[in-house]
Each structure stands twice: as structure tokens, then as C-alpha cells.
Image (cartoon, rainbow, N blue to C red):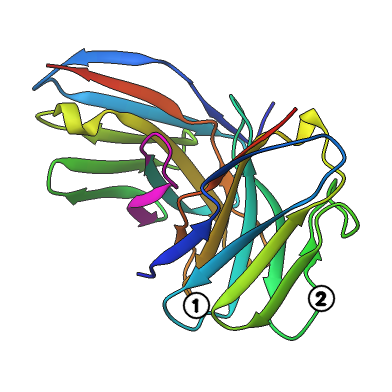
């Protein structure tokens, strides 16, 4: 089993819909959870950053962590065509020597 | 946050040649990282560039193939040496935030090796 699993998509949804992006992981030591957005021909951009379990909201974006299920989600409300990008989940353990492990990314298309 | 300038943005190279990628940050940073992003694959850490010391390479990456320089706290280079088509990938420079797991990335270098 890979450390981090993420469905590559592509995921196509109509404008205005709620988008749900997910990752599962196997390492119970992971404590830091991040979502990055990557537009075509650009580097990843940090979107959401959470520590341990729970929810975090920032505008139209909500990050959710369920450590008991080893499952994290990113919800995008009122999706816009400008949200079309690849979304990468990432996570790491508390030890500062631990690497950040990335998912493969989910390609998202918001249809106008 | 940090503004990271990376160049070239893309290049097409011949097999057996070398390419040096430059990364400039707008502020002094302790940790700089080099990642590779292959199609359909997750971001893979190549090495951590430390100012004033040798870079630390991850398993599967060696200094002879990917020499790194870090002459000061705002600049680093990654060289992809003796290239083969398998080196075709996006290479990304990244910096970390002290005391945090947050990373900031440059725009990447799209490398194609013929």
C-alpha cells in the first residue's frame, strides 16, 4: 500500500457545484496535512494547511482531516472555472527530519 | 510567503548534455529543496540544498547526476548531468518556512531530453 493515495481524475463538474477531493494515507504518524493547487505550467501553490484532525475553512475552501480513518478531504464551494487545476494533497509527521509526502494530484475541470 | 524565480522555464536538450537550473528567492531562507515531478507521479524530493555545506540527497539520487550549488541564502542551482530521455520531467525549486511544514515553489522547469 502506498503512503498516500489520491485519485488522479480527471474530475469534471459544472460551475457552481460543490467539489470534493480526497486522499487516503497509511502512516498514522502523519500530523501535518496540506493541499496544494497547481495550474498548468506553474509550480504548486499552498492552499490549505492543517495540523492534526478537524476542519479548517478559508473562503470557499474547507479542509477536513479524519485521522481515525486516515482520510483527508478538500471541499470547494461554488466552484468557478478558475478553480480548474491539479490539486495535490501532502502530509508529514511531526519529526522535522521526516519528508513531506505528496499525492499524485487530482486534475479538476470546472465546466462553465 | 516567498517569491521564487526559476529559470529556464523550459528547455529541450540533447542526450548526453547537461542543463543547469537556477533558483532565486526574494528573501534569505535556510532550507531550499529540489523536486522532480514526472507525468502521473507524485512530487519526489531530489535533495535539500544547505548553504555552506553539501546538499543532502534522497535515495535514488546521486551528486554526480544532480550536482547542486548553494552559494548563499537566496540562490541555488541544480544541474541535470549526462541527460537521457528518462530525465524528461518538471524540476521544481522550493523553500520552506522555518518551524513549519509549509513549502513555496517556483514555477518549475519543463525539461525534455531527445
Residue A62 vs B86, above or below: the answer is below
The C terminus of chain B, quarter of image: top right
Q: Say which quarter of the image contains residue B110.
A: top right
Determine the residue positioned at 42% across, 26% down.
A106
**Range covered by the magenta-colored residues:** A38-50
Task: Please tell me which of labels 1 and 2 falls first in the chain.
Answer: 2
- Residue B37 in magenta stretch: no
Pinpoint the chain carrying mark 2. B
Pinpoint the chain carrying mark 1. B
Determine the residue positioned at 63% across, 50% down.
B35
Residue at the spot of label 2: B54
The label number, if any, that marks residue B98 in the structure image: 1
- Residue A49 in magenta stretch: yes
Sort mark 1 into few (<14), some (14-19) or many (20+) by Cα contacts within 10 Å: few
How far apart are labels 1 and 2 at the CA level? 20 Å
User: A17 and B8: which one is in front?
Assistant: B8
Rendered location of residue B45, percent (x, y):
67, 51
The N terminus of chain B, quarter of image: bottom left
Amino acid at each position: 500500500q502506498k503512503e498516500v493515495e489520491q485519485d488522479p481524475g480527471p474530475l469534471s463538474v459544472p460551475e457552481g457545484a460543490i467539489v470534493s477531493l480526497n486522499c487516503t494515507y497509511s502512516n498514522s504518524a502523519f500530523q501535518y496535512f496540506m493541499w496544494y493547487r497547481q495550474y498548468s505550467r506553474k509550480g504548486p501553490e499552498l492552499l490549505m494547511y492543517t495540523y492534526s484532525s478537524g476542519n479548517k475553512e478559508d473562503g470557499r475552501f474547507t479542509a477536513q482531516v479524519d485521522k481515525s480513518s486516515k482520510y483527508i478531504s478538500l471541499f470547494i464551494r461554488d466552484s468557478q472555472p478558475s478553480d480548474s487545476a491539479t490539486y495535490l494533497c501532502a502530509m508529514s509527521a511531526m519529526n522535522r527530519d521526516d519528508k513531506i509526502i505528496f499525492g499524485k494530484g487530482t486534475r479538476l475541470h470546472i465546466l462553465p | 510567503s516567498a517569491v521564487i524565480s526559476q529559470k529556464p522555464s523550459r528547455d529541450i536538450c540533447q542526450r548526453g548534455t547537461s542543463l543547469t537550473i537556477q533558483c532565486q528567492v526574494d528573501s534569505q531562507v535556510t532550507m531550499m529543496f529540489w523536486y522532480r515531478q514526472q507525468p502521473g507521479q507524485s512530487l519526489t524530493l531530489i535533495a535539500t540544498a544547505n548553504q555552506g555545506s553539501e546538499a543532502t540527497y534522497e535515495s535514488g539520487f546521486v551528486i554526480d547526476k544532480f550536482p547542486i550549488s548553494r552559494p548563499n541564502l537566496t540562490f541555488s542551482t541544480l544541474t541535470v548531468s549526462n541527460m537521457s530521455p528518462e530525465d524528461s520531467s518538471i524540476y521544481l525549486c522550493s523553500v520552506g518556512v522555518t518551524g513549519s511544514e509549509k513549502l513555496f515553489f517556483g514555477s518549475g522547469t519543463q525539461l525534455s531530453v531527445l
